[in-house]
Amino acid sequence: MPRFFIDESCLSEKHAFVRGGDAVHIGRSLRMRLGDEVTLCCGGMEYECKILNISDEECRCEIISSHNGRNEPNVHLTLFQAVPKSDKLEFIVQKAVELGAAEICPVLTSRCVSRPDGKSFRKKLDRLNKIALEAAKQCGRSIVPTVTEILSLDQCIEKLSAADFPLVCYEKGGKNLREVFSQTEYDGKTIGIFIGSEGGFDEKEIELCLSAGVTPIGLGKRILRCETAPVAAVSIIMNLTGNM
Amino acid sequence: MPRFFIDESCLSEKHAFVRGGDAVHIGRSLRMRLGDEVTLCCGGMEYECKILNISDEECRCEIISSHNGRNEPNVHLTLFQAVPKSDKLEFIVQKAVELGAAEICPVLTSRCVSRPDGKSFRKKLDRLNKIALEAAKQCGRSIVPTVTEILSLDQCIEKLSAADFPLVCYEKGGKNLREVFSQTEYDGKTIGIFIGSEGGFDEKEIELCLSAGVTPIGLGKRILRCETAPVAAVSIIMNLTGNM
């Protein structure tokens, strides 16, 4: 069923409204009709709705039922990704959203080849958040994961080390994810995983992570590309925590 | 260290030879010198070598030591992938090789939108096998995983059902991979996993799989794109079998 994300201001007790481009999309591209059903998501809730009225400005819907988002993982995973070259971050954002990440924080580390300044990255950020939104619709999320501004290493480590499971993926090895996630209950836990860019991390960066209590993890003996590592790590974590 | 795959004919007791384009690559692109070290792989073995002589035709090396490939998983995983649209198969091959698959078999299922004939696919196949070779070098494999000709559904099910762990990824759900891989020892086991194209599988195809003894597995509640599912599945299987 088509799925749209709406603002809280578009919700009343019995009705929900889709506005802007999504309204046009419902009426023109999807060619939906009165009585057709859509899923509207807001703040992690899902509203199963019937269309009452369609125009290019607004699609008015009746709320049939509502429930907590059924496809959301029960853990809050933040991916801290050192900025990779070219358009790899777009790929990583799309896949991380599909796989269940709640937030993606690009990070500038010493080995990042691509070093966008704040201004040029802000433009990119719009695009990254659009990719996150589209991926969230397509895969059936009930929240739209956020891509944040670029963090410095210090900002990253501060945020990362506040997670219940703060992890850094180190190419020279570390704990296996099976050891880290060996318990059986993870409801509400926060997980942060920090992944390097093409050149990985330098030792000083790893030392800073370790001294902040971050656990180094390894992803096996094969050298994964910097865009493969986050996809593999998020997949494995979601499986081990019972969310995939 | 640079890694090259050589034929058995290029190995003698004490020496190994790199020929053709790789010899040019060693001398011209990498600008290696006499005495520099390379890893040469043949038949799953790795030979640590020193360069004795470089020309555009041949690079002659002295074998210093040899051992079984250290980065190979101890399971033999075959990915049966229903042919997806556009160049997604290239992406899937690259990632599956990095993650440890031993073989990738494209399969034609009823919902494949892209339906290349044998002749047009053969051209593509050369490219896919080159991608597999490059990925194998880059990530440190000691075998080059093969991409096979396109299999029919019958051929796929016959080959798949011969695996110790024959699996099909079904979007309507199935066992969790943690249930399938709950033992502790997998050395030498064969695993086959069949993944659909954009439209997934039709029910008849799933029934045929089930009646051949293939286990349906689920990858969680979010709908994964057809190129995300194999990356997630291979990552999780390699983790659960102790290979990542």
Image (tube, coloured by chain):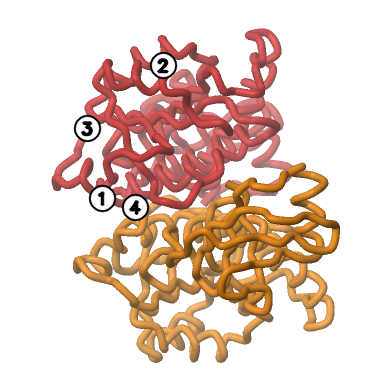
Chain colours: A red, B orange
Evaluate whether label 2 is on the same chain as label 3.
Answer: yes
Q: Residue at x 57, y 65 (%)?
A: B41
The earlier-in-sequence mark between 3 and 4 is 3
The answer for which chain carries disc 4 is A
The earlier-in-sequence mark between 2 and 3 is 2
Query: Can residue A224 be seen from the camera position used here?
Result: yes
Q: Quadrant of residue B83?
A: bottom right
Instruction: Determine which residue is flagged by label 2.
Output: A156
Q: Residue at x 68, y 39 (%)?
A: A25
* Badge 2: residue crowd in 10 Å (few <14, some 14–19, many ≥20): many
* Badge 4: residue crowd in 10 Å (few <14, some 14–19, many ≥20): many
At label 4, which amino acid type do we have?
Met
Q: Quadrant of residue B217?
A: bottom left
Q: In the rendering, at what x and y percent does residue A102 appear?
A: 40, 31
User: Mark 4 to mark 2: distance in Å?
Assistant: 27 Å
The answer for which chain carries disc 2 is A
Q: In the rendering, at what x and y percent does residue A20 appear?
A: 65, 26
Instruction: Determine which residue is flagged by label 3.
Output: A188
Q: Secondary structure at mark 3?
A: loop
Q: Secondary structure at mark 1?
A: loop
Q: In the rendering, at what x and y percent does residue B160 appear?
A: 46, 83
Vertical arrangement, residue A216 with respect to residue B174, above or below: above
Vertical arrangement, residue A209 with respect to residue B53, above or below: above
User: Mark 3 to mark 1: distance in Å?
Assistant: 12 Å
User: Mark 1 to mark 2: distance in Å?
Assistant: 26 Å
Q: Secondary structure at mark 4?
A: loop
Q: Is residue B87 left or right of residue B48?
A: right
The earlier-in-sequence mark between 3 and 1 is 3
Evaluate whether label 3 is on the same chain as label 4.
Answer: yes
In this view of the protein, which residue sits in the foreground, A84 or A119? A84
